Amino acid sequence: MITDEESAKAYVAQHCDVTAMSKLGRFIELLTAENARQNLVAKPTLDVIWQRHIADSAQLLEHVPRETGLWLDLGTGAGLPGLVIAIMRPSWRIMLVESRKRRIEWLESLVREFSLDNCEVVGRRLELVESVPASVICARAFAPLRNTLDLSARFSTSETLWLLPKGRSAAQELDDLPAKQKKLFHVEQSLTDEASGIIVGKLG
C-alpha cells in the first residue's frame, strides 16, 4: 500500500524512466500553479499530490499489457490519469476527452510543453466525439458507472479493457449494474487508498 509522498514517488519511479519523472515533477509545478486559477483538483490534495494524483494514476498500468493500442481517458479534467500515462508511456497513443474550454486550453499547453506527440486533446463533449475503437477506456470522477458505460460503449470492442477508479463507491456502483453487466467486472483494491477501489473488466 502506498501510504505517503515518499512511497508514492518511489512507486512511480519504478514504472517509468528518469525523463518521465522529470516531466511529472514539472507537471506537478504547473498543476499547482494552475489550480490557483481554475479548480482542477481539491486544494488539500496538493499536499499529497504524488500519492493522491500521480501514483493513483500510475497504478492503472498494473492492469494493462506492456504494449497497448489507443487509451481513451474520459473527462480527463486536470489530465488525470491520461496525461500522467502519456508522460510515463510516450510510445502509447493517448486521447484526452475534455469539454471545458479553460481545461482544454491548459491541457493543450501541457502537451506542447512536454512534446507529447502521442497525446491528443479532444475538446468536445463525449457525445460529439467520433467513435473509435479503444484498447483501454478509463474515467476518473467522470460519471456514475452505469452512465459511463452507456455513454462510452460505442468505443468498446470485445477486447477493450475498462479501468474505472471509483473511490469508496466502487463496490456499490458495481452492485447497481444489471446482472448481465455486473458479472463482466470486478473491483480491484486501490494501492493509494485502502478504502478505494478500481472497477476493472471487459464488456465482451
Image (spheres, rainbow, N blue to C red):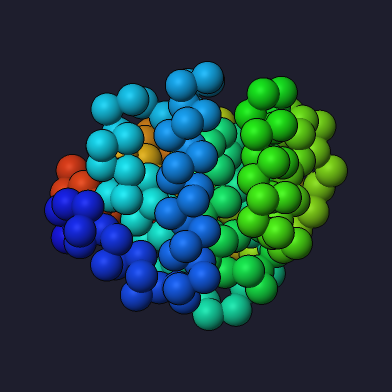
Q: Is residue 28 visible?
A: yes
Q: Is residue 36 left or right of residue 47?
A: right
Is the residue 25 above or below the residue 179 in the image?
below
Left or right of residue 201: residue 149: right
Name which residue lies at 80% across and 38% down: 129
Q: Position of residue 186 (x, y in %)?
A: 36, 56
Quadrant where the N terminus is found in the figure: bottom left
Which quarter of the picture shows residue 128?
Answer: top right
Residue 187 seen in the current view: no
Position of residue 146 relative to residue 83, above or below, is above
Quarter of image, res 116: bottom right
Between 6 and 41, which is closer to the camera in this rendering?
6
160 and 110: which is toward the camera: 110
Residue at the bottom extreme of this rendering: 66
Q: Kindly identify the residue that appears in the image at 70 percent across and 27 percent down.
A: 99
Screen quadrant of the C terminus: bottom right
Residue 66, position as x, y percentages in the image: 53, 80
Closer to us: 40 or 203: 40
Picture quadrant of residue 41: top left
Find residue 194 and report its horizontal and vertical position in percent: 16, 49
- Residue for point 39% across, 52% down: 54
Identify the residue at horizontal 44%, vertical 45% (top origin): 28
Q: Is residue 110 left or right of residue 49?
A: right
Image coordinates for residue 147, horizontal then vertical, percent: 55, 31
Disc tally is: 0
